Amino acid sequence: PGGQGGSGADPGFDGEPRLPGRGPWATRLAVVGFARSGPAAPSTTIPGPPQIDLSERYLLPEIAPEVASYFTPEAQEYVGAMEASLLRLEKFPDDLQTIQQLFRTAHTLKGSAHTVGFKCIGDIIHHVEDFVGAIREGRTRMTADLTDVMFRVIDIVKLLMRRDARSLEQTRREFGGTMQRLLEFRTAVLGEAPAELTLAPAPAAGPHVDES
């Protein structure tokens, strides 16, 4: 519903404050292109499903030093809190207080990442938020497989936060593989059938052509 205008915070989940732009409408999986139906595409275009964005611009965004100076320690604190919650849930998977804490932390990290322009972190954390939300609503339970994929997300976030161009190929492999697994879990665990995304090959340097 609301846009991103206004100067104050509005209530988020569980009454938690949420900055403008942190709502679900502001978070969506970054994709390149869209699957088409209808007339055949021109011969120069290979039709197919949209692709997970593995571009350098997406995975290694330009963040102003002053923004990084406050976002990085804040994000590290959130990641540490999420990791601690997951370790506890490995032993006590039905601990509702820990589940609530994990949800709030994931929600806050997602919003912070999108606010500063670190969209890839916000996008991948959004999946964790959705899974934990389904757990606290009783639609699914915390399982060993789900815990494992959430730990993988945390490892990816740590890698992304380094913003090291020398690790770009490793980041592409691990981010792409984890996103694929998350999408599979959305179908298996949440019963959803989101876009049939495919993993893009190493992106070309040229601009993407929109066939719309």
Image (cartoon, rainbow, N blue to C red):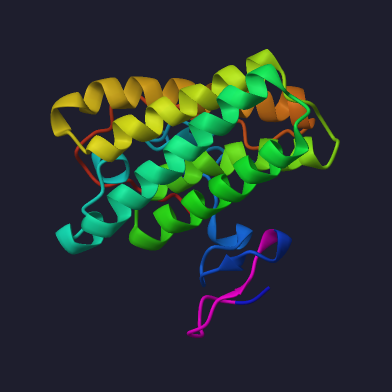
Please say whether residue 6 is one of the residues in the magenta stretch: yes
Q: Nearer the viewer, residue 138 or 44?
A: 138
x and y, in percent, of residue 48 in the image: 53, 30
Residue drawn at x 45%, y 34% as measured from the top left: 52
Tell me the quarter of the picture where residue 2 sits.
bottom right
* Residue 79 occupies quadrant: top left
Percent across and percent down for residue 50 are 51, 36
Q: Position of residue 68 (x, y in %)?
A: 23, 55
Is the residue 22 above or below the residue 178 in the image? below
Image quarter of residue 46: top left
Q: Main secondary structure of the magenta part?
A: loop
Q: Which residues are magenta?
A: 3-13
> Residue shown at 34%/57% (left/top)?
117
- Name the outermost residue toward the bottom: 6
In the picture shown, does residue 168 fall above or below 124?
above
Give the residue furthest to the right: 138
Residue at horizontal 43 percent and vertical 57 percent from the top: 112
Name the one closer to the observer, 86 or 206: 86
Q: Front-most of 135 and 53? A: 135
- Percent x, y for residue 44? 36, 35
Residue 135 is one of the magenta-drawn residues: no
Report the quarter where the N terminus lies: bottom right
Residue 32 appearing in the image: no
| Residue at 24 percent of width and 61 percent of height | 67
- 149 vs 205: above or below: above
Image position of 181 (left or right of 91): left
Residue 99 in view here: yes
